[in-house]
Image (tube, rainbow, N blue to C red):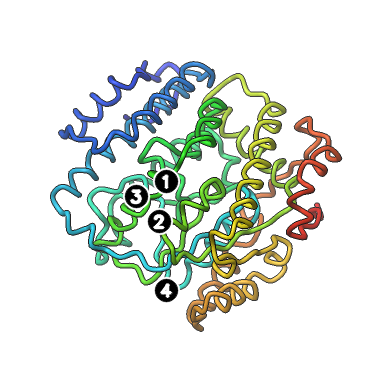
């Protein structure tokens, strides 16, 4: 569907599982969704969207489009796998994962790491429009790039223009793995689009192993005709599943970024509130701040417990503090390469420096925020996260 430009142009849509699945079948001409792991996620998501997200007319239209795209992608990718089972022979070797709290420098780190000619990353356009698999020869000219640029411009770009001050968006940019995980309808990507705390609570409680097994299949699919020397991946939701990353990718390399959680929560609340207001007329930023502060404190405890369990070689994970990274990004990347025994070529460094020069911090305007504006007491929040900041030596943010 074309994105409407006026309220009276927004069509009525149905947010029910069977209707959406039927629409996806009709749109794709296919009927096999593969295994049905995704149904619980779909049902939980729809229950939350219909019951608590308080969607406005555009929000319902937008949610419908997002779910229909994920379901249609699932049908098409399932068909591609049936036709080409040899995709399963693709080997994923030592992927590099950036895991972090949101708003902790992981996006700029990821953007720099993928400047390396040896880096393969899931581009935004191929995550959202994956079928057929990208071809190496046409990777930079695929018509889906322009299609997704139009989508960005006509959704967030039009309805939340300040969003690009907070988070870079472009069809060719590397995408977060939570978009890939949307394939199973089990992903925090939906919690970032809509205020659906019951869905988020469910996501945080379940065993996510099947999501990461699917993640591996998606990388195989994407590199089938567009090979990878080394996958460079990133998502904040990986904090909830670091154990599963190492189960599915035993040779994974992980960089965990660290930033003052008080700055993180303030920045994240500002970002999410802006996005939520596009789809709902009933948003309370104070509630959002409390919910996500609780959530990320739980995530940090979970990842710390895993790292202390002895189930992973400590050398497979490198800690990077936000302040140190932002002070000298190239030096920190050199440290990352050295830690994991990777070659930091002159060409990779040249491209990274060029990217920094062309994309200075605040290029699209400065994003201002503070914790008190969202009803949180800095002293109480400082105490909430003391277990984390003292363990990793994370200093209060300067701003």
Q: Residue at x 35, y 54 (%)?
A: 216
Q: Residue at x 33, y 35 (%)?
A: 37
- Rounded to the nearest angstrom, the CA distance separating label 2 from label 3 is 34 Å
Circles 4 and 1: CB atoms closer than 8 Å: no
- Rounded to the nearest angstrom, the CA distance separating label 1 from label 3 is 34 Å
Q: Which residue is mark 2?
A: 248
Q: Which residue is mark 1?
A: 209
For marks 4 and 3 on the same chain, the one whose residue lies earlier in the sequence: 4
Name above or below for residue 231 compared with residue 101: below
> Residue 117, which numbered label?
4
On the image, the x and y values in percent for residue 272 come to 60, 36
Circles 4 and 3: CB atoms closer than 8 Å: no
Tell me the SS state at disc 1.
helix
357 or 79, nearer to the observer: 79
- Rounded to the nearest angstrom, the CA distance separating label 4 from label 2 is 25 Å
Tell me the SS state at disc 4.
loop
For marks 1 and 3 on the same chain, the one whose residue lies earlier in the sequence: 3
Q: Which residue is mark 3?
A: 146
Q: Nearer the viewer, mark 4 or mark 3?
A: 4
For marks 4 and 2 on the same chain, the one whose residue lies earlier in the sequence: 4
For marks 4 and 1 on the same chain, the one whose residue lies earlier in the sequence: 4
- Rounded to the nearest angstrom, the CA distance separating label 2 from label 1 is 8 Å
For marks 2 and 3 on the same chain, the one whose residue lies earlier in the sequence: 3
- Rounded to the nearest angstrom, the CA distance separating label 4 from label 3 is 23 Å
Left or right: 138, with 363 as reference point: left
Position of the N terminus, as image quadrant, is top left
Examine the image and state in which quarter residue 153 appears: top left
């Amino acid at each position: 569907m074309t994105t409407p430009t006026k309220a009276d142009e927004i069509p009525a849509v149905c947010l029910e599982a069977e209707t959406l699945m039927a629409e996806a079948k009709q749109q794709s001409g296919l009927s096999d969704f593969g295994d049905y792991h995704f149904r619980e996620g779909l049902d939980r998501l729809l229950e939350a969207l219909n019951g608590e997200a308080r969607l406005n007319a555009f929000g319902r239209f937008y949610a419908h489009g997002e779910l229909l795209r994920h379901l249609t992608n699932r049908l098409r990718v399932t068909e591609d796998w049936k036709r080409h089972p040899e995709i399963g022979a693709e080997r994923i070797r030592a992927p590099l994962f950036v895991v972090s709290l949101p708003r902790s420098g992981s996006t700029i780190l990821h953007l720099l790491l993928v400047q390396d000619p040896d880096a393969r990353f899931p581009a935004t356009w191929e995550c959202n429009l994956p079928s057929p698999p990208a071809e190496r020869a046409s990777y930079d000219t695929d018509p889906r790039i322009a299609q997704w640029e139009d989508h960005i411009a006509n959704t967030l770009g039009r309805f939340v223009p300040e969003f690009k001050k907070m988070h870079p968006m472009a069809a060719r940019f590397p995408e977060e793995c939570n978009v890939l995980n949307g394939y199973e309808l089990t992903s925090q990507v939906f919690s970032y689009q809509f205020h659906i705390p019951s869905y988020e609570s469910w996501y945080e409680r379940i065993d996510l192993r099947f999501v990461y097994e699917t993640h591996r299949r998606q990388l195989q699919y994407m590199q089938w005709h567009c090979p990878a020397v080394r996958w460079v991946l990133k998502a904040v939701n990986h904090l909830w599943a670091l154990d599963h990353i190492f189960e599915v990718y035993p040779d994974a390399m992980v960089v965990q970024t660290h930033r003052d959680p008080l700055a993180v929560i303030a920045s994240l609340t500002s970002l999410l509130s802006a996005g939520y207001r596009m789809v709902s007329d009933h948003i309370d930023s104070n509630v959002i701040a409390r919910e996500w502060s609780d959530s990320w404190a739980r995530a940090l405890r979970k990842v710390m417990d895993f790292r202390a369990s002895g189930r992973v070689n400590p050398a497979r994970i490198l800690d990077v503090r936000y302040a140190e990274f932002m002070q000298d990004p190239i030096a920190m990347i050199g440290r990352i390469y050295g830690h994991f025994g990777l070659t930091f070529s002159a060409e990779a460094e040249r491209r990274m420096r060029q990217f920094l020069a062309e994309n200075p911090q605040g290029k699209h305007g400065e994003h201002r925020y503070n914790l008190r504006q969202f009803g949180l007491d800095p002293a109480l929040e400082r105490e909430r996260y003391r277990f984390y900041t003292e363990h990793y030596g994370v200093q209060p943010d300067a701003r």
